[in-house]
Amino acid sequence: DKGWLLLLAYVGCFSHPALDWLNNYGIRLLEPVSSQWFYGDSIFIIDLWMWIALGVSLWLSLRRERRGLLNWQRPAWVGFAAVCAYIFANGLITGAAERMASSALAASGNPNALVVASPPPFAFWKRDIFWRTADRYGTASFVPGIGGHVDIGGAPTGMDDPRLATWVKADPAARAFLFWSRMPVAQKDGNAILLRDQRFMHPLAQDRFQVRLTAPDTASYPE
């Protein structure tokens, strides 16, 4: 049926950006009209539990269909409903984590800090939290029912380095990185500067999300 095929194509076209929005990597939903980034901060970019739930429910439905059972679609619908509930619950956890960190930062004299809660790969109920002000950044953690801890002190972002303006202007890779980066951090690396994003500074991930910036007479390259 071509009608169902067209409907499935539309479902794919709309669900893909919707799912991309759920993670904290970011998506520009309004391109080419606007380059604004949008973030859901609710689901890890490759969520194992969603893959398992959808895969198992699809497999059960296909097995029931091959056996000629009535209501063979039921497992797929149950899996879909479970994933929707899972997404909603994760959104609530993210909201609670960000409110906790924002309150702690406001009490310490930083009422306008940017706070981002991010789920780790497997422990979906936990949140790694990143915060930043105009010149400092720090981390926090949160577990529902237990509470959280906020590193109030933080560290300098390094984005006030006087070399940055000139060096970035001469470096396309650095400009592209800063266009994408939501929480940029500049760290000295000898005579160079490493541009990193605070969300992706875990030792296992930071090398894939950084740009080494050097003086304009030398080349920089994505790490």
Image: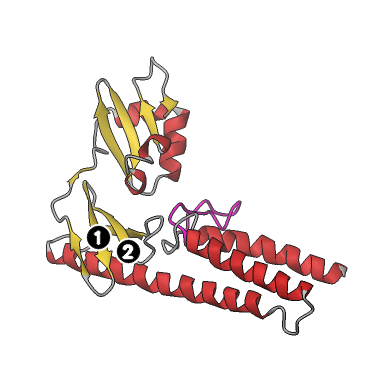
Of 115 and 75, nearer the camera is 75
Label 2 packing within 10 angstroms: few (<14), some (14-19), many (20+): many
Which segment is the magenta one? 22-38
The outermost residue toward the bottom is 70
Quadrant the C terminus occupies? top left
Measuring from the top left, give residue 50's x and y in whole percent.
52, 64
Q: Image check: 168 left or right of 59?
A: left
Element under disc 1: strand
**Residue at 13% in and 51% down:** 153
Asked whether 29 falls inside the magenta stretch, the response is: yes
Measuring from the top left, give residue 48's x and y in whole percent.
49, 59
Q: Which mark is residue 126?
A: 2
Q: Which residue was labeled with disc 1?
A: 141
* Amino acid beneath label 2: Lys
Measuring from the top left, give residue 211's x and y in whole percent.
39, 31
- Give the prevailing secondary structure in the magenta stretch: loop
**Residue at 69% in and 73% down:** 61
Q: Are marks 1 and 2 in contact (CB under 8 Å)?
A: yes
**Residue at 57% in and 57% down:** 30
